[in-house]
Image (spheres, coloured by chain):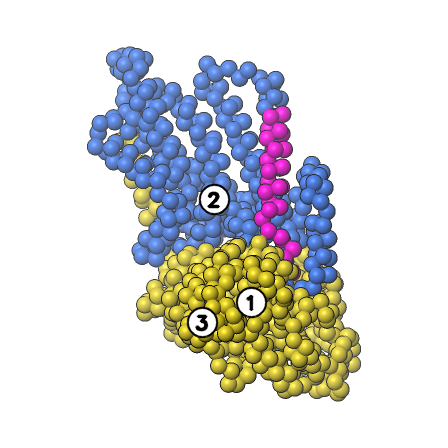
Chain colours: A yellow, B blue
């Protein structure tokens, strides 16, 4: 008897709780499920995707990226270049921080100085000096002619000098104050971040009046939260869940190519390659590198290994970015030609080589590496796999002394190919700060000079020309073998209006509700 | 008694010391945190500077001694990512975990003991056999799968429960607690069920085994013949003796529930210290991982100690010396 009573009590309790207390969201409120939490809401502490994305709701920069990564005015309403290294910016007047303080030129100067001693100092490394001409005019002197200054300024979020000085780092982080479209209400770490619209926003108050960001790190749970109606929008949908969301009438799946290129580094410029047991390094021969490219069936990888959620790459950056060359054709799978090229180069029976790849960094990375190995075995190149977790992988491949073939990825978040070339392809140890991750030991003086020239011009058009020249040289040499671009997957309830961005950011101020 | 307690405290310190060695050295094989922190385009000089700032340029043994010295002062180091005290980060999230553990433990006891008593007292009834089958499933089903299924059935399909998160909270003695609000309580049910299932099944089976053993004994027959009521016979006379092995295992089970909370918290986005551990592993945030493991080891050792003390009050035959 006693037991029966207990069971009835428990069940009644559960039912009351389950059925009761339903809270209906207002029409202008949204809940967004994110794959990660912000690390900081102080914009100057770390350069991390989710952190930057959430900070952009609270803070403004002088200029902004549009959805297509074009630069548009923000707190700087216009600018001009006086010389190759001197820029003048005219600021919006009457802009107020959330605490009522007025935004002036000195707040920008303060923010730049504040960044100088942090881990993200590279954002301001090319700025020699900031001069406050008057409250609404700024002069920026760059270290050298620097075409992509605006791309750097886009990353520099501006804090209120008085507030930052008064409250110190810790409080600024937990109670951030900016000029941005949203004000923070509450941040409970790894639980939620709630923001309300800044009704006095200088650029017009956002349509969504209240937004809650919930970090839901587990992919399946994030999808479940959307399916159950707990959240209205999620980012980083896992490929496995894509079908399920697409088949639901109330939900919309957004698919688009991401900026992340997956590519192969080829060790083709050293006499001897560490994992190839031959007198000399066969991959020094362009024909062998071409054979490898011809031997890989990118279409098959995209279709079967990536389940269609990837886009074959024809060069190193997408067509909307600087450095893209019209007319470069990717090598389509041709095993016969690959074998011929190998034979011509003197390796009719192929050789054995190790491919280093991460197994937890990119979508299906281990499977893709396996597919490449099996495809190359068909042209006689015997690929041994060395798969590693990312925490080991990047350490292992960085110096490049142990690797012959490396599969890895790069996101051109700066809007051009320049940074990628500087890091991965400029000759190692020759120019300061360049070539630090040149895992293939690529060296070509024409290429180096083109990249350096692209950094020493103040005009974006000239930079584009130099980078295009570099792209052509690197592609002719097959310094990297481009494979595919990953896909960005987002999902939302159908009544949420949102235009996806090239950089995959999710901004509440770019959303609206259409019921 | 006093002598026994001091002896146990010495043992606990020794265990924690050994744990610190294992944790520290195993951690140092988990990849280079420096390379996770700097951008891929960082120069060698930047990497070296970061390594020096974190104190990772010194030999491993030296690092270990610095680590132990700091622990003795209650300093577990600063999180590489948040630049805050690692122990503070964990303590911030502890109420959420303890709350979840508390509800799970309560749930296991409330369900496991009566069912176990019933199944042990009447092993041949059909309902007892069903209970045993259920407990077998509870032990053998993978935990994370059960969690996902709970979400898909109750949150996605029937939409009667929230899929994840913690819901509304209130401040209670300076801690954020959710079980005191209707919304918060609703959020804790599914994760607590998932977390309790395995220990529930184990406790149930142990109670049953104990009961079956006890029910055969003479004093039960005697009690029955002198006319003790059924409920009183089962829950007072029999259960008390059946509980001794249950309590031993129970202590370990609480520890296991705390440890398994990492999985539950990750699946249900429960903002507790277990989720912090998983996030920290993904970020190679070594000080937080080390501090977490040390704290959990401490809780384990403490629980076992408490269990040993509790024995005596239940079974006076056990001698602590």
In the rendered structure, are the residues bearing label 3 and label 2 in contact, judged by CB atoms less than 8 Å apart?
no
Instruction: Judge whether A124 appears above or below A189 on screen.
Output: below
Q: Residue A176, image x and y in percent?
A: 63, 63
Q: Which residue is mark 1?
A: A282
Dot 1: chain letter = A
Instruction: Judge whether B38 appears above or below A128 on screen.
Output: above
Dot 2: chain letter = B
Q: Residue at x 75, y 83 (%)?
A: A86
Labels 2 and 1 positioned on one and the same chain: no
Answer whether residue A59 is magenta in the image.
no
Of residues A393 and A265, the one nearer the viewer is A265
Q: Which residue is mark 3?
A: A339
Asked if one can make out residue A52 in the rendered structure from this viewpoint, the answer is no
Labels 2, 1: front one: 1
Q: Is residue B34 left or right of residue A260?
A: right
Q: Secondary structure at mark 2?
A: helix
Q: Is residue B232 left or right of residue B97?
A: left
Residue B261 circle label: 2
Mark-to-mark CA distance, 3 and 2:
55 Å
Of residues A460 and B31, the one nearer the viewer is B31
Q: Magenta residues, as a range?
A: B10-38
């Amino acid at each position: 008897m006693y037991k029966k009573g207990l069971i009835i009590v428990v069940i009644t309790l559960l039912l009351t709780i389950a059925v009761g207390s339903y809270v209906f969201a207002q029409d202008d409120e949204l809940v967004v499920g994110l794959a990660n939490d912000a690390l900081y809401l102080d914009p100057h502490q770390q350069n991390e995707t989710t952190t930057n994305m959430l900070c952009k709701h609270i803070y403004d920069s002088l200029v902004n990226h549009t959805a297509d990564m074009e630069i548009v005015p923000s707190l700087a309403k216009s600018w001009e270049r006086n010389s190759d290294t001197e820029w003048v910016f005219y600021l919006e007047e009457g802009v107020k921080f959330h605490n009522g303080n007025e935004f002036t030129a000195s707040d920008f100067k303060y923010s730049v100085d504040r960044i100088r001693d942090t881990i993200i100092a590279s954002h301001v490394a090319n700025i020699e000096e900031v001069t406050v001409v008057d409250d609404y005019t700024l002069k920026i002197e760059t270290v050298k002619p620097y075409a992509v200054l605006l791309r750097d300024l886009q990353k520099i979020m501006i804090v209120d000098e008085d507030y930052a000085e008064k409250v110190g780092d810790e409080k600024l982080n937990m109670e951030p104050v900016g000029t941005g479209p949203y004000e923070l209400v509450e941040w409970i770490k790894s639980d939620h971040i709630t923001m309300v619209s800044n009704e006095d926003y200088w650029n017009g108050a956002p349509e969504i009046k209240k937004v809650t960001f919930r970090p839901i790190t587990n992919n399946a749970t994030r999808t479940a939260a959307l399916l159950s109606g707990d959240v209205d929008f999620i980012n980083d949908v896992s490929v496995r869940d894509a079908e399920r969301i697409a088949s639901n009438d109330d939900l919309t799946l957004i698919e688009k190519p991401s900026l992340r290129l997956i590519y192969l580094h080829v060790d083709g410029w050293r006499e001897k390659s560490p994992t190839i047991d031959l007198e000399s390094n066969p991959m020094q021969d362009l024909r062998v590198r071409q054979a490898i490219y011809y031997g890989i069936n990118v279409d098959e990888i995209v279709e079967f290994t990536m389940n269609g959620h990837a886009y074959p790459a024809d060069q190193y950056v997408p067509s909307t970015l600087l450095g893209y060359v019209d007319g470069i054709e990717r090598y389509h799978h041709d095993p016969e030609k690959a074998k011929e090229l190998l034979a011509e180069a003197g390796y009719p029976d192929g050789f054995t080589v190790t491919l280093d790849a991460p197994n937890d960094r990119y979508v299906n990375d281990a499977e893709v590496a396996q597919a490449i190995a099996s495809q190359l075995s068909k042209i006689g190149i015997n690929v041994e796999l060395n798969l590693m977790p990312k925490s080991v992988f990047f350490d292992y491949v960085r110096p490049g002394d142990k690797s012959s073939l490396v599969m890895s990825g790069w996101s051109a978040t700066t809007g051009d190919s320049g940074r990628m070339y500087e890091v991965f392809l400029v000759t190692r140890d020759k120019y300061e700060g360049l070539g630090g991750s040149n895992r293939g030991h690529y060296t070509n003086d024409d290429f180096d000079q083109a990249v350096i020239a692209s950094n020493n011009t103040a005009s974006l058009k000239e930079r584009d020309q130099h980078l295009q020249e570099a792209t052509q040289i690197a592609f002719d040499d097959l310094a990297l073998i481009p494979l595919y671009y990953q896909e960005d997957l987002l999902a939302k309830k159908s009544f949420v209006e949102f235009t996806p961005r090239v950089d995959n950011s999710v901004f509440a101020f770019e959303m609206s509700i259409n019921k | 008694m006093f002598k026994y307690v001091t002896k146990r405290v010495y043992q606990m310190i020794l265990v924690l010391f050994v744990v610190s060695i294992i944790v520290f050295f195993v951690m140092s094989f988990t990849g280079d945190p420096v390379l996770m922190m700097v951008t891929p385009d960082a120069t060698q000089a930047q990497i070296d500077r970061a390594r020096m700032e974190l104190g990772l340029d010194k030999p491993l043994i030296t690092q270990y001694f610095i680590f132990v010295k700091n622990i003795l002062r209650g300093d577990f180091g600063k999180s590489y990512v948040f630049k805050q005290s690692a122990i503070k980060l964990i303590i911030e999230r502890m109420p959420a975990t303890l709350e979840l553990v508390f509800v799970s433990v309560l749930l296991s006891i409330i369900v496991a003991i009566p069912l176990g008593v019933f199944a042990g007292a009447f092993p041949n009834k059909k309902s007892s056999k069903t209970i045993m089958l259920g407990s077998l499933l509870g032990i053998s089903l993978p935990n994370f799968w059960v969690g996902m299924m709970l979400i898909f059935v109750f949150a996605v399909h029937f939409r009667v429960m929230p899929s994840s998160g913690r819901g509304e909270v209130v401040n209670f003695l300076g801690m954020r607690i959710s079980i005191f609000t209707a919304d918060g309580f609703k959020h804790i049910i599914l994760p607590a069920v998932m977390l309790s299932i395995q220990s529930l099944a184990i406790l149930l089976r142990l109670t049953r085994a104990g009961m079956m053993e006890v029910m055969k004994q003479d004093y039960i027959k005697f009690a029955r013949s002198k006319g003790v009521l059924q409920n009183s016979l089962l829950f007072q006379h029999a259960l008390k003796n059946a509980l001794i092995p249950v309590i031993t295992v129970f202590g370990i089970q609480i520890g296991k529930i705390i440890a398994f909370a990492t999985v539950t918290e990750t699946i249900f986005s429960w903002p507790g210290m277990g989720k912090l551990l998983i996030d920290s592993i993904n970020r190679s945030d070594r000080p937080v991982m080390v501090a977490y493991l040390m704290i959990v080891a401490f809780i384990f050792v403490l629980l076992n100690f408490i269990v040993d003390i509790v024995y005596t009050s239940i079974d006076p035959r056990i001698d602590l010396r």
